[in-house]
Image: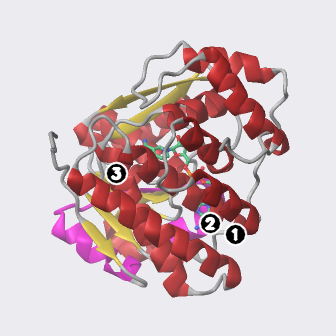
């Protein structure tokens, strides 16, 4: 057994109702005036957070947008500076947390994350910014949130189909972490527990959308899977989804859901089982074809060429022909290769 493991600092406040502990958390972090960031569709919860913070809230900016356009990042940085904020609280999914990271990258302001999806960005030092349709990403320890408040009650509003696709997005981090070149025993423990928690919770959420314990189970799995994402280097699956999202603007969590069984089958991964994941997605009403997400068949070759010419670690060599076959099956909604 050979491995290198480097722990990232991680502070987590978890549990239903933990949003009420946010003001104490802000005091604990010695922050005095924070800017609350969220997306336009999450303004109500952003306001709830701002109200809970009282005079420690410098302002609310409900402008987070998918993939963090540079113009939105520039505006958030300007508003944070004008208000004299000493930190940001990012409330929402990966888009809102990504905006907090963009401010941290420029000004070094600490980010407190309040995730409302299972995307996992709150556990990683990875930032992303999009300019002229091209997304750049990088790693910087200063964008890693200093504290993460996971309150499952905030996820009750997630429509069931988003909960399922976002949950499978999280499973993807854990699954690729298991065969990553920088995997290690402790990360694999987190990955297996993340998959277990998510695959148990998602059917329960579909059966009973108001079940707070099921929502908590999924958020717990998302935390672990996000930590795996932060600790390892992702392979073919994430590269494919990045290309499909960046080039064709396909929706993030739905694309992960469709591609994952096929990418795992390509890599010969047995854990989690590609066939079982494909069956689970179908049973839970999630999309299973790239065609239904709006991808044109003619784009298969373009994405296959783009991904096969990129450099990234993967357990199996990546060929244009291999990726083309994988994408054809994912596009058509066929089961993953045996
Ligand atoms: N840097 C990283 O490490 C990292 C990791 C994962 C994802 N990401 C990025 O995050 C983005 C995807 O994140 P996402 O899937 O969370 O999408 P998102 O943040 O764009 O949210 C998706 C949609 O769900 C809505 N939503 C979020 N929470 C909700 C809730 N509780 N109830 C109802 N609606 C809710 C949002 O308003 C939005 O319309 C992508 O841009 C991806 O690249 C980055």
Q: Residue furthest front?
A: 338
Q: Dividing the picture into quarters, in which one does residue 165 lie?
A: bottom right
- Left-right relation of 323 to 125: right
- Left-right relation of 130 to 124: right
Q: Secondary structure at mark 2?
A: helix
Q: Is residue 126 visible?
A: yes
Q: CA distance from mark 3 to mark 2?
A: 20 Å
Residue 331 vertical position relative to residue 229 in the rendered view, above or below: above
In this rendered view, identify the residue nearer to me: 316 or 78: 316
Q: CA distance from mark 1 to mark 3?
A: 25 Å
Is the residue under label 1 in contact with that under label 2 (CB below 8 Å)?
yes
Q: Residues within 10 Å of mark 3 (few under 14, many from 20)?
A: many
Report the residue at 59% width, 36% height from top: 241
Q: Which residue is mark 2?
A: 163
Q: Which residue is mark 1?
A: 159
Q: Secondary structure at mark 3?
A: helix
Is the CB of mark 1 within 8 Å of ligand 1? yes
Which quadrant is the C terminus positioned in?
top right
Is the residue under label 2 in contact with that under label 3 (CB below 8 Å)?
no
In this rendered view, identify the residue nearer to me: 54 or 287: 287
Q: Position of residue 308 (x, y in %)?
A: 56, 17
Q: Position of residue 57 (x, y in %)?
A: 37, 64
Q: Position of residue 286 (x, y in %)?
A: 73, 59
Residue 259 vertical position relative to residue 45 in the rendered view, above or below: above
Q: Dividing the picture into quarters, in which one does residue 315 lie?
A: top left
Q: What segment carries the magenta color?
A: 18-47
- Queried whether the magenta region covers residue 45, the answer comes back as yes
- Left-right relation of 140 to 77: left
Is the residue under label 3 in contact with that under label 1 (CB below 8 Å)?
no
Which labelled disc corresponds to residue 228? 3
- Queried whether the magenta region covers residue 218, the answer comes back as no
In this rendered view, identify the residue nearer to me: 10 or 327: 327
């Amino acid at each position: 057994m050979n491995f290198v493991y480097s722990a990232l600092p991680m502070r987590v406040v978890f549990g239903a109702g933990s949003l009420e502990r946010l003001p104490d958390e802000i005091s604990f972090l010695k922050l005095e005036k924070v800017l609350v960031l969220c997306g336009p569709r999450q303004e109500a919860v952003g306001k709830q957070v701002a109200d809970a913070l009282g005079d420690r809230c410098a302002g609310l900016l409900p402008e987070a947008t998918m993939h963090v356009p540079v113009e939105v990042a520039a505006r958030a940085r300007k508003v944070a500076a004008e208000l004299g904020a000493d930190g940001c609280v990012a409330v929402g999914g990966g888009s809102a947390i990504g905006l907090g990271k963009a401010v941290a990258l420029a000004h070094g302001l600490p980010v407190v994350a309040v995730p409302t999806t299972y995307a996992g960005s709150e556990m990683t030092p990875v930032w992303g910014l999009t300019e002229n349709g091209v997304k750049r990403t990088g790693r910087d320890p200063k964008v890693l949130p200093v504290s993460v408040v996971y309150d499952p009650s905030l996820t009750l509003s997630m429509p069931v189909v988003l909960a399922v696709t976002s949950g499978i997005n999280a499973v993807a981090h854990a699954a690729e972490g298991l065969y990553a070149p920088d995997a290690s025993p402790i990360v694999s423990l987190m990955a297996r527990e993340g998959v277990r928690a998510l695959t148990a919770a998602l059917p329960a959420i579909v059966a009973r959308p108001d079940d707070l314990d099921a929502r908590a189970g999924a958020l717990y799995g998302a935390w672990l899977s996000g930590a795996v994402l932060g600790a390892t280097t992702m392979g073919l699956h994430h590269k494919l989804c990045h290309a499909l999202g960046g080039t064709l603007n396909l929706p993030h969590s739905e694309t992960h859901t469709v591609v994952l069984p096929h990418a795992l089958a390509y890599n010969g991964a047995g854990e989690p089982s590609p066939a079982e994941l494909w069956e689970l997605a179908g049973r839970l009403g999630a999309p299973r074809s790239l065609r239904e997400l709006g991808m044109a068949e003619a784009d298969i070759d373009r994405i296959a060429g783009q991904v096969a010419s990129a450099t990234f670690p993967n357990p199996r060599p990546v060929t244009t022909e291999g990726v083309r076959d994988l994408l054809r099956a994912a596009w058509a909604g066929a089961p993953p290769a045996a």
